[in-house]
Amino acid sequence: MKNVQRRVMTSPQELVDMGINMRATKQEINCQVYLLLSLVLFVSLFFLSATFAQATESPERVVTAFLVTAYDYDPGASGGDIEMGRSICATQCNAFSTDYLNYSEAGGWRIIKMASQEQLRLEIKNPFMDGDCLCTADRYEIRINELSYPDRNILGEKIDHEFESGQ
Amino acid sequence: MKYFVPLLLVLLMAGFMPLNLFAAPVESLTVEQVRILGERMYREGVLPSGEPMQAFAAGEIPVEATTFTCISCHLRSGLGAIEGEVIAPPTTGRILYELREPYMKGNEFVPSYHSYAVTLPARPAYTDETLAKMIASGVDPNGRSTMKVMPRYQIEDDDMAILIAYLKTLSSEFSTGASKEFLHFATVIVDGTDPVEIESMVLPLQFNIDRKNSLAIASQNNARVARMAYNMLGPDLLAKRFTLERWVLKGPSSTWYSQLENFYKKNPVFALLGGISHGDWEPVHRFCEDNQLPNIFPLVDYPVLDENNWQTIYLSRGFRQEGEAAARYLASMSELFKERRVLQISRASRRGNALKNGFNDSWAQKKKSAVTDISLPVGSTLNAQQLLKIIKTQDPAVVIVWDDASAIPALRAVAQTTDWKGLLLTSGTWLGDDLWALPEDMRDGLYMTWPYRLPHENIRFDISLKRILSGRKLEDFNSEIISKAYISNEVLGKALIDMRGEYYRDFFLDSIDMLNDTYFPLYERLSFGQGQRYASKGCFIVQLGKGVNPQLERRSEWVTR
């Protein structure tokens, strides 16, 4: 059987024997506790102020975006020209599709896919045609916090660049 | 009658003299004659006799060299280009008659120079004989055949001598305005232009010049900056100091040409950057053509429209472009309204006429239904009742109104009417800021031309613009002009880097022509191509969306020429 040595708590006397002044150690411990407490207090205050800043500035805004993957034209009862309708709907659905670069280039962002292949029915925008455009799209939620946006600091607060160099 | 025979003789002599001259050997021609004849062979593929040069494409297929000209691959400057897998090496005498090695002496460690040098095959220096052999048979001094896209030209010895003599003069000395130490630029400002607009143009241009110069200074003091700048620009461009002069034109436009001559005489610059005028620009354009002085992206509303001109590259075709785009957009759906007419009402002003003529010229090319043109005298306001009456009488399929914001009440009346079914179109830019406050009840019924990227999609470029404002606020400037000047800066930088230290004006323009399409602020797309002188070729047709802070909604793709 393997001989296992158990660790025994060192008694105050043994500490004294080892040259360690117990009173001094207690003082040090107290000091550490105070330090720890003040650190906890500081961190709490920091997060509180951050939360407050978030609540007031609301740096994260949510945008629902669609990325259109297919389109079609439904003439309905109008009997509209299918080919022309498809051509117009191509533009209309394409325009409906979000250019995600508008969000992702500027600052901090997250893009989360919420639904796939949703079918959206839009009234065709053309004075010479009736019917609907059918846009098939993936739906996304873009959460923009703009953390890296040059005009905002890490809390989303506006920075005045008046005295900063253009570089 | 007694004058008829001598006159006939004179005319005949005049007709045949060039032929006799062209048949002469190169030694008997003046330098200028060689330049003219050689240039015609190089640029147009036409022999001194006036006949087209004969060429064989892909080795054996006979083609006319007027289609397969030297310039189409080796460019106007003769300094060539690399486009995909097609390598068109320089054809200037200065480079042809030098040994080509797989590196460029003095620039061995500059990445762009290095990758260019290793792409071109090494070869011994040409002689007149080996060059003539290359042009005729496509075999270089190494005995290696060139790519098949290079035609083989059938040229008689005397004509070949003229062509070779011309190549020896092509891009042989740096253009005026470029020296070992300096590269001089100027920008033209028409006196009386809004000071905010002037500053919106000059500040970015000057920032770019200062940034380049400070980079040179910083690289003298900081090794890391020096290495970055060396890699990016190469030692030659890095060392050059840029200058920018402001040439302010005063008085009537008829005096501008001579004012420009004086400016140019005092400081012969390499190129003009930007420039601003809301009215005339023709004298500046003509001055640039006459002096072979490039001008990139002047901010003008009425550019000179001449496809054969070379020196000025405009951002677009000005106001006219909206009219042209409207015609193309409507032509694409003209099947839907068949023979119904188009009613076009335009303000009798320069802007109104530009829009109207742009529409009419493009519409005529498409050979679509008839157009009724009505002109609105200056000072009058478009009357809603009269307009509705005309619409009721004519029942046009499309009503186009080229007018300012004073037309909004009339446009509103038409947009709301239920008695008429058709498309109502106007210029979005001419409505100015009033566009954003159009009453909700007319937004569904009004279509507008918009020659820029949609504003809500352009916001992302604000970051780039702010970088050149040295901490000042974008709102204090005209952001449209700032964007245009920013584009000039970017294009200038890219072209100069691509020029690899060859400071020839033609090569400067060639290098811009060879730029890839790039995303810039303001315009949905800018495209470049050989001889193309209007970088933005498109326009959107839009409608204003709903709400207090509405966005423009696309009703067309980027309609291009």
Image (cartoon, helix red, strand yellow):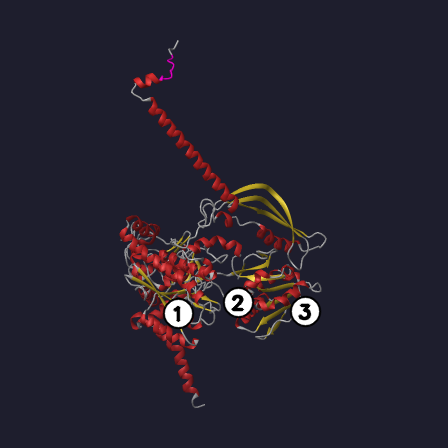
- The disc label shown at residue B288, or none: 1
Mark 2 or mark 1: name the one nearer the start of the chain: 1
3D distance between C-alphas at marks 1 and 3? 48 Å
Callout 2: 10 Å neighbours few (<14), some, many (20+)?
many
Dots 3 and 2: beta carbons under 8 Å? Answer: no
Circles 1 and 3, Cβ within 8 Å, touching? The answer is no
Q: What stretch of residues is rendered in magenta?
A: A4-11
- Principal secondary structure, stretch drawn in magenta: loop
Viewer-side residue, B319 vs B308: B319
Q: Is residue A138 above or below residue B138?
A: above
Query: How far apart, in angstroms, are the residues tagged by discs 2 and 1?
Result: 22 Å
Identity, as a three-letter code, of the amino acid under mark 2: Arg
Q: Chain of mark 3?
A: B
Q: Secondary structure at mark 1?
A: helix
Residue under the image location 32 percent in, 58 percent down: B213
Name the amino acid, label 1. Cys
* Disc 3 versus disc 2: nearer the observer: 3
Q: Callout 2: helix, strand or loop?
A: helix
Residue type pointed to by label 3: Leu
Q: Nearer the viewer, residue B194 or B15?
A: B194
In the picture of the structure, the residue carrying the numbered disc 3 is B388
Give the answer, above or below, for where A3 lies relative to A74. above
Q: Nearer the viewer, residue B107 or B39?
A: B107
Q: Label 2, on which residue?
A: B320
